[in-house]
Amino acid sequence: MKKLPRSKFRNSAVLLLACAAFGLTGCDASAPSENSSEEQAQDTASAADSADVSNPDEAALYASCLEIADKYKDIYTQAFDTGSLDALDTIQSIVSRLGEEGYCASDADNQMNMVNPDQLESFLSAAGSGGEAEADVLLVMENGSIVCYEFRTQGGSISAQRCTLYWEGGAPKAGYYEAFTAEEWYYTENGYFFFDQYRMPGYDGPPGEIGIRVKPLDADCREYNRKYVIPVGYNRNNVLISDWSESDGFGSLNFYDLYDLMYRMKYGMEAPYPYAYTGAEYEIPAAEFDSVLQSYLNISTDTIRSRTVYDPGNDTYQYRPRGLEDAEYPYPPYPEVTACETQADGTLKLTVQAVQTTNLTDQAVISELVVRPLADGSFQYVSNHVTGTTEGISGTWFTPRLTEDEWNYRYRSRSY
């Protein structure tokens, strides 16, 4: 296993301007992005009427953003009417249209390749050499809105102005203006531009770190990531951060964690066994539990029962949902497939990298995940092997599920 380098270019700067924070918080643990620019743009600045501002820089940025709205209004209107604003195809259509108009653009969750990336690459090259340059970047959100950035660099420092173009009653509006200088920034060998917006001590909103993928990924890699890897991710499981295989009984994987994530994959919803503050225990019918795991693993019922609490009398499994004691960090990494290979036995070997924006890295962990596509369109997870880690970062977001003794101490030896 190799230790991973941090960055290609790096710099630091002091804060020029920090706007007042305001409390729109939230995090979808299953979403690809742990900390998208959508969150940053709308969770750390107040909305303002673009026609009633005194700051000339703010007014100019709003005016530029409102001009952009005309470039894709037809796409927005059609998607709104058909209820498809959140569809990947809609976001791709908007990004493509912006590219045709000459803009440097991508999506806010880094799930598609940037158009006209040379504009941002040239800017970052100048920043790395201490030169002067400017670049504008547009990041499309799932609701058809756009985060608009104006970047400037001089002497190795990067400053930014940012606002959000959004729609209200079918009309475009601009708001949520901020201006700041990046405390740190990186442009990595893998093509990520990371930068860090200052947060005052005690700030309880989303983190200030932001990541934008500049270099493209192969289309097959992106498709495999959406189909096989994002559904697993890094939240509340160690599938992608530990070594295991079906031949060794799936290593140290926790079958209850697998049940949670695979139930969501199979049925499109969370398992119907909620957490309770005083602890909760359920008896899940064996056929249901086995079916969920066997939908995605080549695993026998004997192996499942050897690593779970099984009651043969009732033919059920004991199940205890995760709770406050084994909850996880709210901003886990998100996965990217950066290479793929079809092996001689028909399995796919996927190189998966953990992008953890909060640590300004696109290589928090690197692993090789093997997946077996089946003739009926389904698939099985075969193995995972960790090939690279970043010291002090890799796996720090993962909290193991409580053991039997830990659960009993937490919920049975205390009075509520």
Image: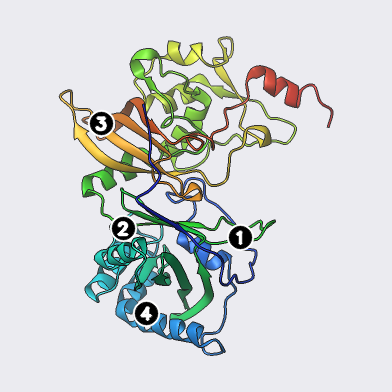
Q: Residues within 10 Å of mark 3 (few under 14, many from 20)?
A: many
Query: Residue, x 64% and y 67% (percent of image)?
Result: 22
Q: Is residue 225 above or below residue 199?
A: above
The residue that label 1 is drawn on is 199
- Regarding mark 1 in the picture, which secondary structure is present there? loop
Mark 3 or 2: in front is: 2
- Regarding mark 3 in the picture, which secondary structure is present there? strand
Q: Are marks 4 and 3 in contact (CB under 8 Å)?
A: no
- Regarding mark 4 in the picture, which secondary structure is present there? helix
Judge from the rendering whether residue 109 lies leftward or rightward of residue 223; answer left or right. right
Foreground of the two, 14 or 240 = 14
Query: Residue, x 47% and y 28% (percent of image)?
Result: 258
The residue that label 2 is drawn on is 214
- Counting residues from the N terminus, which is met first, the one under dot 3 or under dot 2? 2
Mark 4 or 3: in front is: 3
Q: Amino acid at mark 4?
A: Ala
- Counting residues from the N terminus, which is met first, the one under dot 4 or under dot 3? 4
Q: Amino acid at mark 2?
A: Val
- Regarding mark 2 in the picture, which secondary structure is present there? loop
